[in-house]
Each structure stands twice: as structure tokens, then as C-alpha cells.
Image (cartoon, coloured by chain):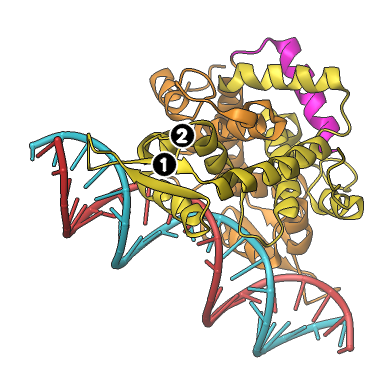
Chain colours: A yellow, B orange, C red, D cyan
Amino acid sequence: MDRPRMDSVRLNEVRRRAPKLSGAPLDYGMLGQLTGFSIKLAWILGYGLLARAFGDSGVTPLRFSMLELIGRNPGLQQIQLGQALGLSRSAATLAIDFWESRGCVERRTEPSDRRSFGVFATPAGAAELDRLRGLVEQADEALTESLSDAEILQLRALLAKIHL
Amino acid sequence: MDRPRMDSVRLNEVRRRAPKLSGAPLDYGMLGQLTGFSIKLAWILGYGLLARAFGDSGVTPLRFSMLELIGRNPGLQQIQLGQALGLSRSAATLAIDFWESRGCVERRTEPSDRRSFGVFATPAGAAELDRLRGLVEQADEALTESLSDAEILQLRALLAKIHL
DNA sequence: TATTGTTATACTCTATAACTATA
DNA sequence: TATAGTTATAGAGTATAACAATA
């Protein structure tokens, strides 16, 4: 089944506005030799593509990640969700508030420990997640469109060696 | 000549606090299959290592990039510096203000167009740049310590295909 | 009128700390 | 005392818009 495609004019606009190392009549000095700088440029592009995909819906990469985590791991505590994404407790609270206010997740009190909740996706949350996964997949494909499938696997393997 | 090394205990602390895909008893779902998410995790780690290297000096990755750009391209207008880093005019103004307030750069009025300045590094700025380049190089080496030299080149080439 | 830079302002994101309720 | 979550607050970083000077 075909998913709706992101307008390629818009994709190109994101690409055009992102800073680049080449093309400019400018000496980037050691920045061009830094792996970290290259990672940052790729991240800027990826973030822009995702933001474009989400539009003005209020969804952000972080909020999507939170919903995906909740959907895949029903019943987790907020503190565990936050840790998995490197967030403070208050930041986790706000991200979950966002989805709860849209009816996509619910906090269920645990009888065994009434200080904490288990966080669950609602049916509406599951549907939203399904929709967003399509958008995210497209954006990720757009990000890596200049790489072959083999190169994508290679890149992920190298990045994994860095952050795993 | 040996440069001062970053304390490896501190490096490991940055690594330990960064979110990871493995180790946690948690299903990251499609996040683990996204190149963009992997890029983000690597970026978080790289940013943390850099922040640790700069300490509480007020220097940030962006401010370092700005100073490096100024040092390598004497006399550029603020608007050109901003564009090279994807900044608005006001953000470029503030980044340059930071270095000017520390005596590291100066704005020289251009007689030919008195609306704009040329931005130049001072001798103090050149010295600071030299010092910071050493810290940045170390942080970048720490970021890629789990990769061989060949793998580092491979990674940079793949990232370049994405953002160039 | 258009452009460069500055300033004022507001917005987003985040963390810290104080607070509530449980344990 | 310690922990889970919430709320209040503050800080960093950013952009937009209004402004001054100049073209």
C-alpha cells in the first residue's frame, strides 16, 4: 500500500537551507575534519526533515520518540521513560502530558505502589503512532536518499560503535 | 609535544550518562532502525564530550565554530558568518558579542560600506583559538575512540554524502 | 526601498528545586 | 528518610520584528 509521500520540493528546501561544508566560498578550517561537526550537520538536516514531516501539529522528534517508547513498552514508569531518552523527571512529565492531553496515552495508578503510574497508549495513541511511523520512515529515507542500502547499513554500524 | 589530556574518568562519565540503545531492558521499536536516531545519539555524546572539554568557560560548540570561522576567514561580514553556521542575524550578533567582550575578535568598519563590519580575530583570539583547537581535537578523538582510523574516514565519507 | 546590524521580545526546551503523596 | 511525580521558576538558545544607520 502506498503511503502519502512528502513533497519533494519541500524536502529540497530543507536541504537547501541547511548549512554545508562545500559550495560556500569559505574556509571551515578544522571543522571540516571533525567527525563531530559532520554528525551535527547530518543531525540538523535530519531534524529539519522530521520537523517538516510533522508540520505544525505540535509533534516533535522527542515527543514521537516518547510515544513510540510507550507504545512498545506498555506500563513503564515515567522515570524509566525519561531515562531511556535522557530526560529529567519534569521533562518526561511534560512530554507525557502532551500525549495525555490529546488522548493518546493514559496514566494508570499501580495499586502496588501508589506513588507511580504505569503509562499506556490508548487506541487513539496506537492509531496516531501508526500514522507517525509512516512519516518518520519517509523522513529517514529522505535523509539517507544519497546512500545505497549497503551504505546505510554501514553507516548505522559505524554510528552504533560510537554510541552503543 | 604532548597536549594536556582530558581526564578519562570524566569522559567515561559522559559516556555513561548518554542514552543508549542497548543495555536497557527496553524496546526502542523503530527508533533503533532509524539512521536519524543513531545520528542523534552520536551527536548527544559528542556534544557532551565537547561541553566537558570546554568546562564552565562559557565557550560552547557553536561559539567555538564561530571563532574558528573568523580566524580562518578574516574580514567576513556578520551575515556571512551567520549563514555559514545556519544562524539568524541576531544570533550571529550575540555569538560575535561573546568573543568581542573577551577581546578575542574585533569589528572593523568598512569604509566602502558603513552598514557592515569586517570581523577579525585579535592576537588574543588567535591564542585562544589555538588552545581550543587542542581541546576540540581531543574531544573528537574521544568520540571516535571505538573506531579504527579507516572506519573514521569511512564514517566521515558517508556522513558527507548526507549533508554535502 | 533595500540591507546590515542591534535591540526588544517571545518562544521552546531544559534543568533544578520546592512541594505533595506515598513508601 | 527516600522516591515518583508535579509545579514553579530560571536559564540557555533561538527566531521574529521593530529600529537605526547607511546604501
Which disc number belongs to residue A119? 1
Q: Residues within 10 Å of mark 1 (few under 14, many from 20)?
A: many
* Camera-side residue of A64 and A119: A119
Secondary element at image label 2: loop
Front residue (pair B17, B21): B21
**Quadrant into which the C terminus of chain A falls:** top right
Residue A109 percent across, percent down from the top left? 30, 44
Label 1's element? strand
Could you confirm whether marks 1 and 2 are on the same chain? yes
Query: Where is residue A92 shown, x and y percent of the image?
Result: 42, 46
Other-residue count near label 2 (Cα within 10 Å), few / some / many at <14 / 14–19 / ≥20: few
Residue B91 or residue A123, whichever sits in front: A123
Residue depicted at 61% across the width and 54% down the height: A59
* Residue in the picture at 71% in, 22% down: A156
Which percent across, then down, holds residue A128? Answer: 63, 48
| Position of A65 relative to B119 (above/below) | above
Q: Chain of mark 1?
A: A
Q: Which residues are magenta?
A: B146-164
The answer to whether residue A31 is left or right of residue C19 is right
Cα separation, mark 1 vs mark 2, equals: 6 Å
Predominant secondary structure, magenta span: helix
Say if B131 sits above or below B10 in the image: below
Determine the residue positioned at 50% across, 34% down: B48
Q: Which residue is identified by label 2?
A: A74
Residue B64 seen in the current view: no
User: Is A138 part of what is drawn in magenta?
Assistant: no
Q: Residue at coordinates 74% horizontally, 29% vertically from top-left? A: A33
Q: Chain of mark 2?
A: A
Dot placed on the residue nearer the N-terminal end, 1 or 2: 2
Looking at the picture, tell me which residue is in the foreground, A22 or B107. Answer: A22
Tell me which amino acid carries mark 2: Pro
